[in-house]
Image (cartoon, helix red, strand yellow):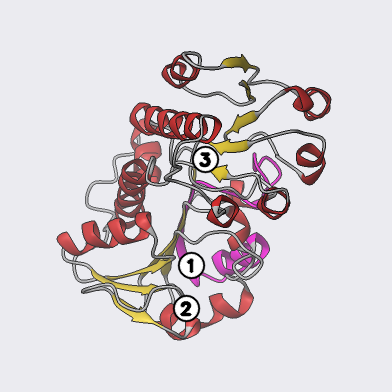
Amino acid sequence: MNIIVSDHVEKEAIEYLRKNHVVAYEPEISMEDLKKKIVDFDAIIVRSRTKVTKDIISSSNLKVIGRAGIGVDNIDVKEATYRKIPVVYAPGSSTQSVVELAIGLMVALARDFVHLNEETHSGNWLKGKVKGMELAGKTLGIYGLGRIGKEVGRVAMSIGMKVHAYDPFVKEAGDIVMYTDFHEFLKSLDILTIHAVLTDQTRHSIDEKEFAVMKEGIFIMNLSRGEIINENALVNALDSKKVRGVALDVYEKEPPTSSPLVKYKNVIMLPHIGAATVEAQYRAGMIVAQEVDKALTGKSILYCVNPEVLSK
């Protein structure tokens, strides 16, 4: 079978696929060229750069679409399902990496690491002039209680934090306090961390009304999808001091070169590196390579976004 890999994937995954298939590794291919070539391939593997649109899918003879990672919002799953094409992915591949980043950013916000690092490098010795905040005893709110959210909650509780969560698809989660009312959930928090999936319902679900009900001086982190927060509303919340500090790994538009957030020293801005570890990228590549191989060789698929296409 012929496979095109149109984004950067670990070499071990490519080598694995080449044992049984012909693989075209073109991680910089343009959308125009991909649309022309896609008809020659039985499978495509992407990360987040390539958009597997309706046009791409309808121009193809694909038997499977693979996403080397978790989010599939760059794939038209509806069109793939209509054409009975399974979309396989790698859930859990980046969980540990994103959890560690979330905990690190939470500590960085509470202790103002970024600002203090800059001041010390500039020769300003602020010992005795600043006070941070302990996380123990504070309330962490987790918006989206999937694999990553649950693990962030577990680690947070281990250091003495109270953990509240909102996820309409989760009713109970052990010692985590679940909310059914989103605004009531937001009212209770010292820190909010976002791990929700981007959908029509979650897009801009953190907006002016949501900031209005939050505690004064809340910290906010987003390691999920940038569009969940209305960035204009976030700017207003920063200006009014409603939000004390922010840590972002994702943005409404990436890269965020024109974002007004770049001027705020109390906003930590990372270049979408949640899954950017050696370990996470190896797992993502290998898991999706194995799933694509299974789909092409008639074996049972384990990780499928649209399992209804697999039923006979």
Q: Which residue is under mark 3?
A: 272
Q: Who's the residue at 47% across and 78% down the image?
A: 214
SS assignment at label 1: strand
**Which quarter of the rendered picture does the N terminus lie within?**
top right
Q: Answer with mark 3 or mark 2, whichever residue precedes in sequence.
A: 2
Q: Answer with mark 3 or mark 1, whichever residue precedes in sequence.
A: 1
Q: Which residue is under mark 1?
A: 243
Q: Is residue 44 visible?
A: yes
Residue type at tag 1: Val
Residue 291 vertical position relative to residue 246 in the rendered view, above or below: above
Is 132 in front, or is 15?
15
User: Disc 1 to disc 2, how far (Cα)?
Assistant: 9 Å
Whether the magenta-drawn stretch holds residue 276 is answered as: no
Discs 3, 1 touching: Cβ within 8 Å: no
Circle 3 packing at 10 Å, graded few (<14), some (14-19), many (20+), is some
Q: Which residues are magenta?
A: 231-260
Q: Position of residue 97 (x, y in %)?
A: 34, 41
Q: Which residue is under mark 2?
A: 214
Q: Position of residue 226 (x, y in %)?
A: 59, 54
SS assignment at label 2: loop
Whether the magenta-drawn stretch holds residue 241 is answered as: yes
Residue 98 vertical position relative to residue 287 in the rendered view, above or below: below
